[in-house]
Image (spheres, helix red, strand yellow):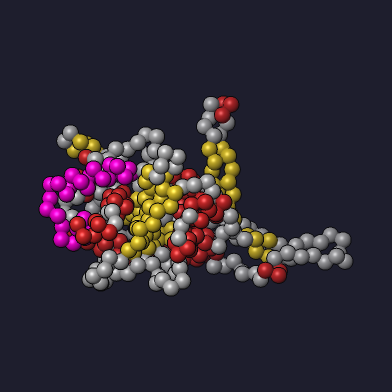
Amino acid sequence: MNRGIHPALAFAKQVEGWSPGVFSQVDKWRETDSLAPWRFMTFRQCKHWLADWLKRNPAPEEGFLCPQIMKRFPPHIVYMTLAAWRTGKTLLHCDESLFRMLGETRQTDALSGEMLRRLPFWGFWLDFPADMVFAEGQGALMGAFFTLADHDNQTDALLALTLAQDPLSREHIPMGMEYLALTHPVSTAISQQEEGNRGFWHAVLPVLFWLCSENSEWGRQGKPVRPAPRRVGKHQRLIPPDKPVQIFAGARAGSALRQVPRAPESSTSGYSPSTPHWRLRPHVRKAHWQSYWKGKPTQGEEKSMLLKWKPPQIVNGKDDDSLEAVARFMKETNKRENVMNASQLTQEHKDE
């Protein structure tokens, strides 16, 4: 395999090679639901789409639509996730310090899974830190494709398609398919997962919630939006971009977090009883989530719950300025520009 190609692109190319032309037909079978605009398509639409392709094409000898593999597990999660990802071809990389700090944030399990409906993509790929292992005895995962789909009449589900190794380096299919209902709280759905999958969701959900939070900033490009379909002949089609869009999240937030000292638990609070006006010792207040309501129904406004991530804060230190997360998201095509932009952001933070 060409080592210069991103694993997500290699995997998508491999799947398309197994089922030529399948993704060009997806728009004929999917419809955007005005009541659920966060879903790219439903399982029922996906079944009709793949059944139509199999009826018009010979059965593949390999891949997810191969009869032998279809007997083992249905291919719908694979094709739904990749079809949603192709609408924007987003490759998201989160600063590793921010990724890990989000994973340590308290109260994530208490959040409502329905907040994930605010993800600004129909589908996207998320890189994982190179040395992150989600379950004991398993190797590190390279990353995952994510999308939202229908689950039942009461809620939706988050689909994840994970890659564990170079997709073209072995004969075995190097991926896992995960499925998490958007329950309230999300801990209800996590508790129903197999024990080996719980570590995966505990690690990735904080990053996904952060993407939905009100104080995640997207730089000069602004917050990504789902692409609008274009009319091609008599049909509305979503034309995938020619090249993938790389988004680098949390450059400044990660730089700020690396400067926060790690305080031992024993020094997080305390006072001297002999002093009349005691104050807390210098310590680091842990990161946490803050949710609040917005909208006044009495004035005709829709009431909705919003989410903010509160990063670690130095309390009673020499500098009490809160390290609010400020993320810079950049569309990068040149590796050299990548390095220059990262250095510039770091210097900007030092200047501040």
Apparent side of residue 1 relative to residue 257 in the rendered image (left or right): left
Residue 195 visible: yes
As for residue 50 lying within the magenta part, the answer is: yes
- Using the rendered view, name the quadrant where residue 163 is placed: bottom left
Image position of 142 with respect to 311: above or below: below
Q: How many marks?
A: 0
- Residue at the front extreme? 71
Front-lying residue, 124 or 80: 80
Up/down of 49 relative to 270, above or below: above
Q: Which residues are magenta?
A: 40-66
Q: Magenta includes 182?
A: no
Using the image as rendered, state which of residue 131 and residue 191 is in the foreground. Answer: 191
Q: Based on the displayed image, in which of its 4 quarters is residue 33 positioned?
A: top left
Question: Residue at image x 44%, y 42%?
Answer: 155
Horizontal arrangement in the rendering, residue 324 relative to residue 248 (left or right): right
Q: Is residue 349 visible?
A: no
Judge from the rendering whether residue 323 lies leftward or rightward of residue 66; answer left or right: right
**Residue 138 rendering spot, x and y as whole percentages:** 41, 71
Residue drawn where x is 73% and y is 64% of the image: 269
Q: Position of residue 227 (x, y in %)?
A: 32, 43
The structure residue drawn at horizontal position 65% and vertical position 64%, both measured from the top left corner, is: 284
Residue 27 drawn at (x, y percent): 24, 42
The residue located at (32%, 63%) in the rendering is: 175
Compared with 150, 334 (above or below) is below
- The C terminus, quarter of image: bottom right
- Quadrant into which the N terminus falls: bottom left
Q: Position of residue 45 (x, y in %)?
A: 28, 42
